[in-house]
Image (spheres, rainbow, N blue to C red):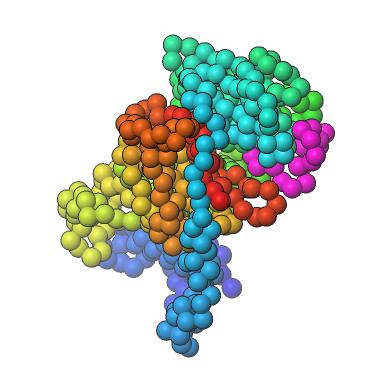
Amino acid sequence: MAQPELPGYYFDPVKKKYFKIQRTQDAPRQDSRYSQANISRQKKNDEDKEIASKSLETRRKQTILRSTRNPLLQASLARETGLKQCHVRWPGAITSGYRSTIVADEPIRYFDRDPITNTLYIAKGEASVQRQRPDQPWDILAHLTSPISSLDYLPASGALCVTTSGSDRSPVIYLTDPDRDGPYLGEMFTPRHCNTIWGTAARPASSSSLCSGNSNPATATEHIAVGASSSLVLLTRANGGIWETDTDKPRALDSDVLALEWLSDTTLSFGCRSGFVYLYDLRTKQKHRILKHPYPVSQLRRTDHETRIVCSGLQNSCVLYDMRMARAQYTARDRELISNSDPYSHTGYPSRKRQRRAHPIAVSTSTQPVLEFQHDNADDLELGLDVHARLGLVAAAQSDARIRISNLWTGKVVREYDMREANAKAVNGQKSAKTSVTNSNRVRCLRFVDDGGDGGASLWASWEGGIQRIGW
């Protein structure tokens, strides 16, 4: 039983007695055990030990350890019994028969597809939004005032969300229901204090909310996250079908929001230009920083588990992170900065006061990834990326107009396609020279599309000549 504290007295747990706390100037010696300075130091040490023990106990409970009876046997069990051979062979077998075919021959920046009616929505040219129903000509839906930065279709309600990046005009968020509203009719939002809109992410509809036809159930609530310059904007549509911005002001951040991805119905992940990846919870309306990518984040995609996420960025970086293993990774430059910035780093146990005088800002530590994918992208923020979790495929557009498909579970490249070679073949079978890679003909949009009910999937990519389908 803990003894109660008495004002001016200290209880010694060893001697089990109370001792009067002596002032430093009144103590017989400076190293007196029960002086005021020594008692404060002892209390501080006890608090630090208690915090460290609680942290150690928490980590011990949350860490899964391999059995010590025969760790070598368990380490090689999956390899010897072939439990993971499916992860190694399956993605390569799925893509072995993929061929490239042209779906549309229009200059398309972004596209999306209605999985129910197979209607195709595209962003043609710089600012035109068009639609094509099966076996029908193209319909013009809208013409915006600045280059389009994203296009997303919501199959649960039939809504279409288009954003612009802004130029001499302010960036806008254009929302419409094409089947009900018709062309050039929709709601337009202009976020305040936003110079650029980089992209959007619509919350995935659950199986219960999907219904036949494009109708919005009365009980359904849709959310669209918008990544803008130094802010995060949330749009909500509930009863009545009217879109509204969140009641709170846009979430102010220290960096631009370049990538967004929903991990669940209530959890949103977004990456920033600074390299930090955050989680935002709709229930608590709080954001938490979970990962640090060494370079600006351009794309985020969820995988087969809600704790794993594929992150693509600049400087040829494309990795798989696991939030449960988010530990810092020091580079050789970081270690050099640490040794140069702290003059007491050579000592094993520097004092607390000196440790606080170090320069943590000079060291930029990134999260250690689980896997690294081969990727070629030095400085382009608009190259496409998509993940098919069930098939274990990661498709990433490269800066040299190639599409590289990798294994989600091993990181190895299974197929690679050169879009210039596929586009060099004309409709009449003649071949033309390869086109050079420019800002207008890069692969901006990649999407895996399910092919009917047989469980197969194909990869659709936007290119300067239109949309190409890579599949069986």
Does the magenta run of residues contain 219? yes
Q: Nearer the viewer, residue 297 or 158?
A: 158
Residue at 68 percent of width and 48 percent of height: 452
Q: Residue furthest bottom?
A: 69
Location of residue 36 (image quadrant): bottom left
Left or right? Give the position of 270 relative to 263: left
Counting from the top left corner in percent of width and height, residue 297 is at 41, 40
Which residues fall within the magenta stretch?
Answer: 203-221
Counting the numbered discs, the total is 0
Residue 199 in view:
no
| Residue shown at the point (43%, 57%) measured from the top left | 414
At 55% from the left edge and 35% from the top edge, which residue is drawn? 103
Q: Point out the residue furthest to the top here.
A: 168
Residue at coordinates 36% horizontally, 52% vertically from top-left?
374
Expressed as whole percent of the image width and height from the top left, the position of residue 299 reads 46, 41
Toward the viewer: 452 or 194?
Answer: 452
Residue 55, given in percent of the width and then of the height, sits at: 48, 64
Q: Is residue 42 above or below residue 227?
A: below
Which quarter of the image is occupied by the N terminus?
bottom right
Instruction: Inspect this view and state whether residue 106 appears.
Output: yes
Task: Give left or right: position of 201 versus 25.
Answer: right
Whether the magenta-drawn stretch holds residue 240 is answered as no
Q: Position of residue 192 (x, y in %)?
A: 53, 18
Residue 331 drawn above or below residue 286: below
**In the image: residue 97, left or right of residue 218:** left
Secondary structure of the magenta portion, mostly? loop
